[in-house]
């Protein structure tokens, strides 16, 4: 696709040179798939008189009073933020738009890959030598003399969503609310063409208003004639309706008379029917009273039988209760005897256990007494041994004293 557009640009440039005609921006009649429901958030690019849309997923710019979109290797422009868009030939795209660095293209094409992000795209390589010959030094300029960014047409914020105007209305609003004069000659020519188209559109609108005024006047006359005819028809319909209502009232009176006679006949028949029903009800009441009397007699017999059955049930229940009471008394006596035997057995076992415990305690006491006697004997023997040791120590001390005394006497004798 990219090569196809490059080749198409070459052929178009050759035809332009051969025919020596001017290249301009096309008429705004394209939809390019960029749908901007609300006015975009445009931010100025530092050092460039161009704005870009950082929050959009497209290569969207604003320069010199027009919106610019780079989509599918093609430049488009529009005086309104959501089109319709005009095709722009690469030869007439403003150089300040082309100088925008790669980093501000929010959806760069694949062939941008590898180019420096802080530099402009390599348009001279992409569009070929013929374009480069006509745009030499397009990427070199005096940055100190860079023009200021143009004012944004913020009045378009009021026309978002369903309020977005059509192309004719756009030109009228643009001419009324946005008075910026473009610097670029191609863009200025585009603005002049749009103003001329807007003047032509207003002239057509004026002629159309005159025709519509004449049509409204003719329509008003036709409507007045039609209303008069409708009034005559309405009067005729009202007269016919009054006659019909008169006939209808007469027919209703005859119907009411006939209905009264029928009601009188129905009342007589109803009285006779009520008399027959009264006799039938009396007979039915007599039959019901007889049946009620037979049912009462039958109920009395059933009550007597129920009383006899209840008395028999009571006697059987009393017999059963007596038998159950006797059985419970016998069971209670047996349980008491068993409890007494268990108590006696428990007493014997406790007595035996106490005797065994007493015997064990006596044996333990005897063992403790024997152990105490043995300890006393051992203590006595220990005391005897201690006395013997003390006696021996005393005897040894005395012997040593005698030996020392004898040694002193010997020394004294030797000294003499």
Image (cartoon, rainbow, N blue to C red):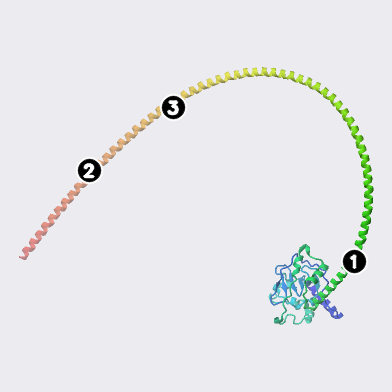
Which residue, given by chain and number where applicable, does mark 1 sit on?
Answer: 210
Question: For this rendering, which residue is in front, 403 or 229?
Answer: 229
Which residue, given by chain and number where applicable, does mark 2 sit on?
Answer: 377
Per the model, the C-alpha gap separating discs 2 and 3 is 56 Å
Which residue, given by chain and number where applicable, does mark 3 sit on?
Answer: 339
Question: For this rendering, which residue is in front, 13 or 89?
Answer: 89
Per the model, the C-alpha gap separating discs 1 and 3 is 131 Å
> Where on the picture, by quarter, is residue 162?
bottom right
Residue at position x 88%, y 70% in the image: 203
Foreground tag (2 vs 3): 3
Local secondary structure at mark 2: helix
Local secondary structure at mark 1: helix
* Number of residues whose C-alpha sits closer than 10 Å to that of mark 1, classed few (under 14), some (14–19) or many (20 or more): few
Local secondary structure at mark 3: helix
In the displayed structure, 317 sits above or below 209; it is above
> Where on the picture, by quarter, is residue 353?
top left
Residue 117 placement (x, y as % from top left): 69, 74
Can residue 8 be seen in the rendering of this structure?
no
In the displayed structure, 76 sits above or below 373; it is below
Residue 327 placement (x, y as % from top left): 51, 22
Question: For this rendering, which residue is in front, 34 or 165?
Answer: 165
* Number of residues whose C-alpha sits closer than 10 Å to that of mark 3, classed few (under 14), some (14–19) or many (20 or more): few
Foreground tag (2 vs 1): 1
Q: Earlier in the sequence, mark 1 or mark 3?
A: 1
Residue 297 placement (x, y as % from top left): 69, 17
Are the residues at dot 2 and dot 1 in contact (C-beta closer than 8 Å)? no
Quadrant including the C terminus: bottom left
Per the model, the C-alpha gap separating discs 2 and 1 is 156 Å
Residue at position x 17%, y 49% in the image: 388
Q: Earlier in the sequence, mark 2 or mark 1?
A: 1
């Amino acid at each position: 696709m990219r090569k196809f557009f490059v080749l198409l640009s070459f052929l178009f440039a050759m035809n332009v040179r051969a025919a020596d005609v001017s290249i301009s921006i096309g008429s705004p009649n394209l939809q390019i798939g960029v749908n901007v429901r609300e006015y975009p958030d445009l931010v100025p690019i530092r050092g460039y008189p161009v704005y870009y849309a950082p929050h959009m997923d497209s290569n969207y710019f604003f320069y010199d009073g027009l919106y610019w979109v780079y989509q599918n290797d093609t430049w488009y422009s529009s005086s309104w933020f959501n089109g319709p868009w005009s095709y722009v030939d690469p030869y007439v795209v403003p150089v300040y738009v082309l100088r925008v660095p790669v980093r501000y293209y929010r959806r760069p094409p694949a062939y941008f890959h590898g180019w420096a992000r802080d530099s402009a795209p390599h348009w001279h390589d992409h569009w070929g030598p013929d374009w480069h010959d006509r745009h030499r030094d397009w990427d070199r300029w005096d940055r100190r003399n860079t023009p200021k960014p143009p004012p944004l047409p913020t009045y378009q914020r009021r026309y978002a969503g369903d309020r977005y105007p059509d192309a004719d209305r756009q030109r009228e609003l643009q001419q009324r609310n946005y008075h910026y004069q473009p610097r670029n000659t191609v863009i200025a020519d585009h603005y002049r063409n749009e103003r001329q188209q807007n003047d032509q559109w207003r002239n057509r609108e004026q002629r159309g208003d005159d025709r519509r005024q004449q049509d409204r006047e003719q329509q008003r006359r036709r409507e007045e004639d039609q209303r008069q005819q409708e009034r005559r028809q309405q009067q005729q319909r009202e007269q016919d309706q009054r006659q019909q209502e008169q006939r209808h009232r007469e027919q209703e009176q005859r119907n009411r008379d006939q209905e009264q006679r029928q009601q009188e006949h129905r009342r007589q028949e109803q009285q006779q029917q009520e008399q027959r029903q009264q006799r039938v009800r009396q007979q039915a009441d007599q039959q019901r009273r007889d049946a009620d009397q037979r049912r009462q007699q039958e109920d009395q017999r059933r009550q007597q039988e129920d009383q006899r059955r209840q008395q028999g049930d009571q006697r059987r229940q009393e017999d059963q209760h007596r038998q159950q009471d006797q059985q419970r008394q016998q069971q209670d006596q047996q349980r008491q005897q068993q409890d007494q035997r268990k108590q006696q057995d428990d007493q014997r076992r406790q007595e035996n256990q106490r005797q065994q415990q007493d015997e064990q305690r006596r044996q333990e006491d005897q063992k403790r007494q024997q152990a105490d006697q043995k300890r006393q004997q051992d203590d006595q023997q220990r005391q005897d041994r201690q006395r013997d040791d003390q006696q021996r120590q005393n005897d040894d001390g005395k012997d040593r004293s005698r030996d020392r005394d004898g040694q002193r006497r010997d020394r004294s004798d030797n000294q003499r």
